[in-house]
């Protein structure tokens, strides 16, 4: 609840990082083991601080283990007032989310570290990572300084609902920046001289939707999604709009199909640009830039991180549930970096909404799971 009270949307995590650092040092974690990287300087969004990283030598032998969670929340959570209401924690401010996504995950990792030091529990070599800018585009883990991580062999990420859930695979995503250029003209005095960028965009969007390349997309066994999420254009009703910018995303576990969706969207805009002309036959133009934001990943159920998590979950009387996610996770980039990372839940419900809450018992179970994974004690 202390962490939830601290405002910390993506790019503004410095106060959250400082609070976690203070709590670690108070529990006995040596300051020399605590560092921050420069991920925010590499991020296109900038930011106040980089990832918070703690690297600890082991008191027992074993492969290094990484425990991680992201610190940032969506802007909706700024101003939340966490309040315990029976089995749940909710925001007493009805206009905000709670920030359990992902302060509950951050608190799970913090609790494990505090318990280890305050109780002087034996543990293998550990790396603790609190990442930044996950909600903005996974920029923290994308640009993490891997030299500070100590080459972990097992890795666990907390971000989600049930503590018994293990996410084995998550989708990959491509962002699209679509710029449509027309010809400006007075909409009343000489509309025939103009080429409307809005008209081009409208034709393209109609084409994409009617052809089934928008929203939930299925072609045989292949599946993906697309969304035209942001559109800007025009500044006056008496002017033919000569520029429209659309920002979109495409997701799929199948990289080949993901690229196919991008091509179909691109071609729809190109066709639309050829259809709209002024009285002199001048056409508009389209420029489409696509960027892979994160690659999909798939962990086998036999992977060491998955097996370790499943063993601990069973030791607590729960049955592991293996999941596929159509959302992106910090684990996307960690797996891309060659660190097999399983994602587990931390009691979050209804994230990114004003109905967000946290299940207290699920959170407590997640803390138990994390502590046993950190100490390499399965039961």
Image (cartoon, helix red, strand yellow):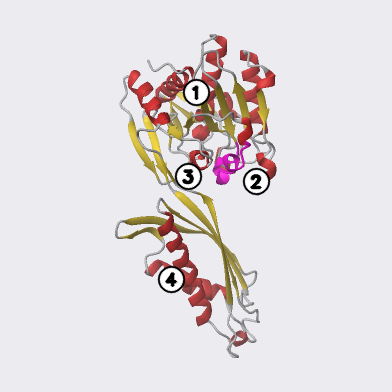
Circle 2/circle 4 CB separation < 8 Å = no
Spatial separation of the CA atoms under disc 3 and disc 2: 17 Å
How would you rate the neighbour count of disc 2 (Cα within 10 Å): few for under 14, some for 14-19, many for 20 or more?
some
Q: Earlier in the sequence, mark 2 or mark 1?
A: 2
* Magenta-highlighted residues: 132-145
Circle 3/circle 2 CB separation < 8 Å = no
Q: Earlier in the sequence, mark 1 or mark 4?
A: 1
How would you rate the neighbour count of disc 3 (Cα within 10 Å): few for under 14, some for 14-19, many for 20 or more?
many
How would you rate the neighbour count of disc 1 (Cα within 10 Å): few for under 14, some for 14-19, many for 20 or more?
some
Q: Circle 1 is placed at which residue position?
A: 63
Q: Circle 4 is placed at which residue position?
A: 206
Spatial separation of the CA atoms under disc 2 and disc 4: 35 Å
Residue at x 42% of width, y 58% of height? 256
Q: Which mark is residue 251?
A: none
Residue at x 63% of width, y 31% of height? 148
Q: Is residue 255 positioned above or below 53 on the image?
A: below
Q: Circle 2 is placed at which residue position?
A: 43
How would you rate the neighbour count of disc 4 (Cα within 10 Å): few for under 14, some for 14-19, many for 20 or more?
some
In the picture, which quadrant includes the N terminus? top right
Mark 1 falls on what kind of element?
A: loop
Q: Is 189 or 170 nearer to us in this picture?
A: 170
Q: Is residue 238 positioned above or below 262 on the image?
A: below
Residue 53 picture location, percent across and down: 62, 28
């Amino acid at each position: 609840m202390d962490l939830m009270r601290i405002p910390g949307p993506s790019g503004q995590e410095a106060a959250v990082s400082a609070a976690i650092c203070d709590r670690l040092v108070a529990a006995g974690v040596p300051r020399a083991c605590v560092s921050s990287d420069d991920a925010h300087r590499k991020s296109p969004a900038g930011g106040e601080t980089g990832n918070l990283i703690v690297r600890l030598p082991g008191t027992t032998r074993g492969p290094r283990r990484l425990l991680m969670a992201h610190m940032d929340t969506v802007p909706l959570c700024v101003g939340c007032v966490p309040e315990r209401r029976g089995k749940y924690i909710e925001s007493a401010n009805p206009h905000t989310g709670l920030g359990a996504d992902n302060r509950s995950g951050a608190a799970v990792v913090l609790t494990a570290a505090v318990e280890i030091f305050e109780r002087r529990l034996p543990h293998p070599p550990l790396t603790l990572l609190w990442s930044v800018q996950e909600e903005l585009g996974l920029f923290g883990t994308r640009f993490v300084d891997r030299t500070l991580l100590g080459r972990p062999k097992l890795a666990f990420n907390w971000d989600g609902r049930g503590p018994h859930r293990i996410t084995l695979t998550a989708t990959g995503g491509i962002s699209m920046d679509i710029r449509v250029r027309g010809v400006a003209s007075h909409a009343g005095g000489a509309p025939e001289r103009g080429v409307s960028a809005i008209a081009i965009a409208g034709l393209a969007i109609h084409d994409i939707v009617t052809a089934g390349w928008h929203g939930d997309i299925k072609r045989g066994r292949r599946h993906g999604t697309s969304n035209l999420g942001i559109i800007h254009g025009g500044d006056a009703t008496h002017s033919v709009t000569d520029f429209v910018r659309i920002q979109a995303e495409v997701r799929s576990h199948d990289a080949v199909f993901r690229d196919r969706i991008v091509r179909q969207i691109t071609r729809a805009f190109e066709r639309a640009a050829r259809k709209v002309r002024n009285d002199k036959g001048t056409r508009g133009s389209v420029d489409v830039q696509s960027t892979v934001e994160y690659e999909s990943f798939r962990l086998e159920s036999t992977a060491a991180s998955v097996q370790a998590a499943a063993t601990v979950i069973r030791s607590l009387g729960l049955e592991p549930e293996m999941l596929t996610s159509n959302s992106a996770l910090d684990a996307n980039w960690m797996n891309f970096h060659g660190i097999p990372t399983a994602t587990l839940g931390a009691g979050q419900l209804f994230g990114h909404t004003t109905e967000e809450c946290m299940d207290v018992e699920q959170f407590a179970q997640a803390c138990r799971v994390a502590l046993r994974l950190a100490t390499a004690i399965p039961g």
